Image (cartoon, helix red, strand yellow):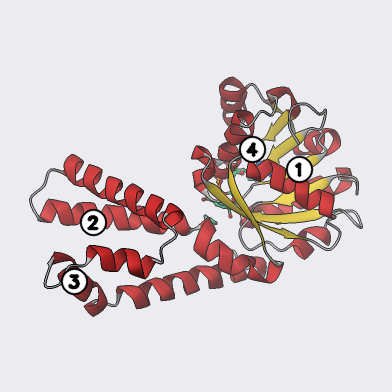
Amino acid sequence: MSSNTSQKVAVLGTGKIGEALLSGMIRGGWAPADLLVTTRRQERADELRTRYGVTPVSNADAAKQADTLILACKPQDMASLLDELAPHVTADRLVISAAAGITTSFIEERLAERTPVVRVMPNTPVLVDEGMSVISAGSHATADALAHAEAIFGAVGKTLRVPEAQQDACTALSGSGPAYFYFLVEAMTDAGILLGLPRDKAHDLIVQAAVGASVMLRDSGEHPVKLRENVTSPAGTTINAIRELENHGVRAALIAALEAARDRSRELASGNNT
Ligand SMILES: NC(=O)C1=CN([C@@H]2O[C@H](COP(=O)(O)OP(=O)(O)OC[C@H]3O[C@@H](n4cnc5c(N)ncnc54)[C@H](OP(=O)(O)O)[C@@H]3O)[C@@H](O)[C@H]2O)C=CC1
Ligand SMILES: O=C(O)[C@@H]1CCC=N1
């Protein structure tokens, strides 16, 4: 739903992902006058008002004034935020949660009966309109509710609907996904230093390799194995690097890493917040 309607959207807990989404919605045509934000700290509220022209309000006022509430606080803060919201959220609101691990039933149990809840796992590339937002319906979310969530998150990248049972896996792959690529770039830049390159040049070379490889992965229609084979010349340089990656168990490490992320998402759902 965009600025040509009078629907108001509130982002509750406007930190990194909340702000990324907010900025994307404004780029996508939402009128700042239709966007409300909540924060815990006054200086953060002032910052958001100055930067985007949006209106900071209390959580209770967000619940009273906005048609759609996007919950973007940390999973550890979700129960207390819901306690604060519960007296003010009526079942004609749409509640969208972007928190890792938190299930739609966790939210439904704490709000008015039959409140529609949608669970979304976005990722930080929403900042550059290249996000991926994975969307699941709660028990009372209608097709319209899902379409509305898709319209919001679709303004800042792609969206994908999955059954909620797959959300923890999607969080491991997609929500956390960008961090793994940043980690690889950081490690490969260090390798450039070891090989004698200045850090800025090493960084630029690796980032451009990542950008080029990403565009080819997305646009060429080729399987990643084929793309890698095309780089790997007989008795050449690349196969020597690949042998070292295999010797050091990088494939197994990545599989274990994503499994650990999936497991942590499940733990967050069960209230293990340590
Ligand atoms: N970062 C990411 O890449 C992604 C994060 N997520 C999910 O998004 C959520 C937010 O993550 P992220 O943006 O990184 O975290 P941040 O800590 O940056 O943002 C959360 C914000 O919520 C505020 N907050 C907490 N409780 C309240 C409350 N009761 N009322 C108003 N504001 C409140 C915090 O205030 P204060 O600053 O005072 O602590 C903070 O600014 C998490 O649930 C995470 O799982 C999902 C996908 C990707
Ligand atoms: O690390 C986290 O818990 C959040 C969820 C997905 C990405 N960041």
- For image coordinates 17% across by 57% down, the residue present is 191
First in sequence: mark 2 vs mark 3: 2
Q: Is mark 4 within 8 Å of ligand 1?
A: yes
- Provide residue 79's location: percent of width, then percent of height: 72, 56
The vertical placement of 250 against 54, above or below, is below
Quadrant occupied by the N terminus:
top right
Q: Amino acid at mark 4?
A: Arg
Towards the viewer: 234 or 262: 234
- Give SS at disc 2: helix
The residue that label 1 is drawn on is 69
The residue wearing badge 2 is 188
Q: Which residue is mark 4?
A: 40
Q: CA distance from mark 2 to mark 3?
A: 16 Å
177, 261: nearer the viewer: 177
Label 1 – label 4 distance at C-alpha = 16 Å
Residue farthest along the left direction in this orientation: 196
Q: Position of residue 236 (x, y in %)?
A: 12, 68
Report which residue position mark 3 lands on.
239
Identify the residue at image location x=63%, y=65%: 167
